[in-house]
């Protein structure tokens, strides 16, 4: 579908006809210049909360998910028959969970 008599289609040719050859070459140089020539660099400033979160995440990444020394201690207690479950403490902790009151 071709749209004729559109005033917007005439804007670009009219503007380029009025530009001299010197202006046209300068325009081409500025528009085709690589971005590496700019001296200003992009930067971002993080809020205090974002910086704190970033530090916490980096520390968390450095710690293992499973504390193997604790697992080994519990495993040896279970194998030796010395592990005792604190049922009252477990019940108190579970009663604090959402939906269990």
Image: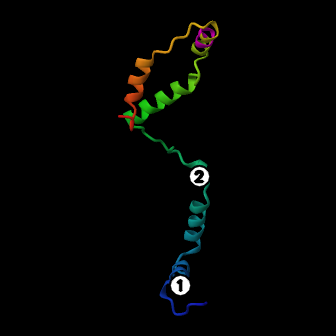
Q: Position of residue 67 (x, y in %)?
A: 58, 18
> Vertical placement of 4 versus 68: above or below?
below
Mark 2 crowd level (few <14, some 14–19, many ≥20, 10 Å Cα): few
The kind of secondary structure the magenta stretch mainly shows is helix
Gap between marks 1 and 2 measured at Cα: 30 Å
Residue under the image location 59 percent in, 73 percent down: 21
Q: Name the residue under label 2.
A: 35
* Image coords of residue 43 (percent x, y): 48, 42
Image quadrant where one finds the C terminus: top left
Q: In this view, does 80 lie to the left or right of 95?
A: right
- Label 2 near label 1: C-beta < 8 Å? no
Mark 1 is surrounded, within 10 Å at the Cα level, by few (under 14), some (14 to 19) or many (20 or more) other residues, namely: few
Residue underneath mark 1? 9
Q: Is mark 2 on a helix, strand or loop?
A: helix
Query: Where residue 59 appears, x then y in whole percent?
Result: 51, 24
Vertical position of residue 72 compared to residue 15: above or below: above
Q: Where is residue 11 in the image (x, y as percent from the top left)?
A: 50, 82
Q: In this view, does 24 lie above or below 67?
A: below
Which circle, 1 or 2, is nearer the viewer?
A: 1
Question: Quick one: which residue is furthest to the right in this view?
Answer: 79
Q: Which of 74 and 8 is in front in this view?
A: 74
Name the quarter where the N terminus is drawn: bottom right
Magenta stretch encompasses residue 37: no
The residue drawn where x is 55% and y is 75% is 20
Query: Can you tell which mark lies on residue 45?
Result: none
Badge 1 marks a residue whose secondary structure is helix
Bounds of the magenta segment:
73-77
In the figure, residue 29 lies in which quadrant?
A: bottom right
Q: Nearer the viewer, residue 7 or 70?
A: 70
| Residue at 56% from the left image edge and 60% from the top image edge | 30
């Amino acid at each position: 579908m071709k749209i004729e008599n559109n005033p917007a289609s005439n804007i670009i040719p009219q503007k380029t006809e009025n530009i001299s050859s010197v202006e046209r070459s300068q325009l081409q140089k500025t528009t085709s210049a690589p971005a590496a020539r700019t001296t200003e660099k992009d930067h971002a400033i993080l809020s205090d909360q974002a910086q704190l979160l970033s530090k916490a995440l980096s520390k968390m990444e450095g710690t293992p998910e499973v504390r193997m020394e604790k697992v080994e201690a519990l495993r040896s207690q279970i194998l030796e028959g010395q592990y005792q479950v604190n049922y009252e403490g477990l019940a108190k902790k579970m009663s604090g969970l959402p939906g269990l009151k």
